[in-house]
Amino acid sequence: MAQLEAQDLAQAVIDRMTDCKEPRFKEVMTALIRHAHAFVREVQLTPDEWMTAIQFLTATGKMCDEKRQEFILLSDTLGISMLVVAIEQAKGAAALKDRPEIRGATEATVQGPFFWPGAPQLELGADIGEGNAGEPAYYHGRVTDTAGKPVADCVLDVWSGDGEGFYDMQKGPDAGMALRAQFRTDHDGNYRFWSIRPSYYPVPADGPVGKMLHRMGRHPNRPGHMHTMLQAPGHERLITHLFVSDSPYLDSDAVFGVRNSLIVDFEKHAPGKAPDGRSMNKPFYTATYDFKLVPSAA
Ligand code: BEZ
Ligand code: FE
């Protein structure tokens, strides 16, 4: 029978995959087709609306290059990136019964589109904030595993926008790296560096995703945060943020990334001696945070 009725189309598409050799791909595509068809039926999508959606996705793709990732932004602002992170963490939680040693691991959050691999490798204590807008902040703490054992030689990538909310990548095609670096923890798992106290900022809103947010009646802002990515042999990679505790938008992050355990008090200090002995001639902040990594499964 050649003719298919609307309610049978999804199953017909799924049935065409009988020769598919990849079970997980087949599982994902089957669910995608089922849900996509159900969505179209639920909202009774019109041809004009479908064309608008295709034009939106086309514009989203055209906006992407090696420095701008509009699809990640779409995923972030629809809460999908955070859902994927949460599902991955829930798998960890489900494994707690078999692996009680992973309890207490630092929570993960979204990576976002502004990670730029190959940041300069700097000595502990270096200042990556100098010359950028923003108030100086000293970040320090320790990286351990969940049992409290120090993780030496952990590579800590850090990146943030400046004190006015702009990332280096947003400062034109020729702008070099700024406010990002890689540090390595010392033999006792300690890390320390200077940067700025990051400001809240809008996610890039000059493209199709910005127009979508506007039409949804949503603001595009994220609370101030420092991004971190921690990698150490024998441990699972951790991608997370440190959120500034008195920043606006902690309760309405445009990408739904806030976790209470990642909110950090940035303590303000008068000019004077900083914890690393540096003499500061203007006010500065200190942010203290200890990261706990999950040991890799044996
Ligand atoms: C960020 O924090 O860098 C970010 C995350 C998601 C979307 C846009 C920016
Ligand atoms: Fe960010």
Image: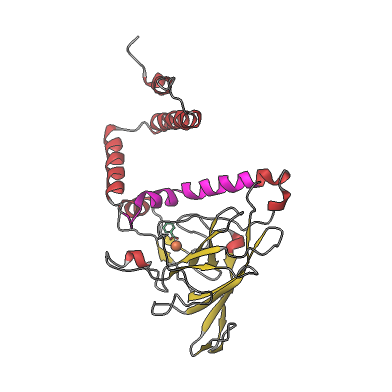
x and y, in percent, of residue 271 in the image = 53, 89
Instruction: Name the quadrant containing residue 265.
Output: bottom right
Please indicate whether residue 48 sits to the left or right of residue 259 in the image: left
Residue 226, given in percent of the width and then of the height, sits at 49, 66
Q: Which residues are magenta?
A: 66-92
Taken as a whole, is the magenta stretch helix, strand or loop? Answer: helix
Residue 90, how many percent across, how many down? Answer: 61, 46
> Which of 65 and 154 lies nearest the eye of the viewer?
154
Query: Is residue 178 shown above or below 294?
Result: below
Q: Is residue 156 magenta?
A: no
Depth order, front residue of 205/232: 232
281 relative to 63 in the view: left or right? right
Residue appearing at x 35%, y 52% in the figure:
70
Q: Judge whether residue 70 is colored magenta.
A: yes
Q: In the image, is residue 106 above or below residue 87?
A: below
Does residue 270 appear in this view?
yes
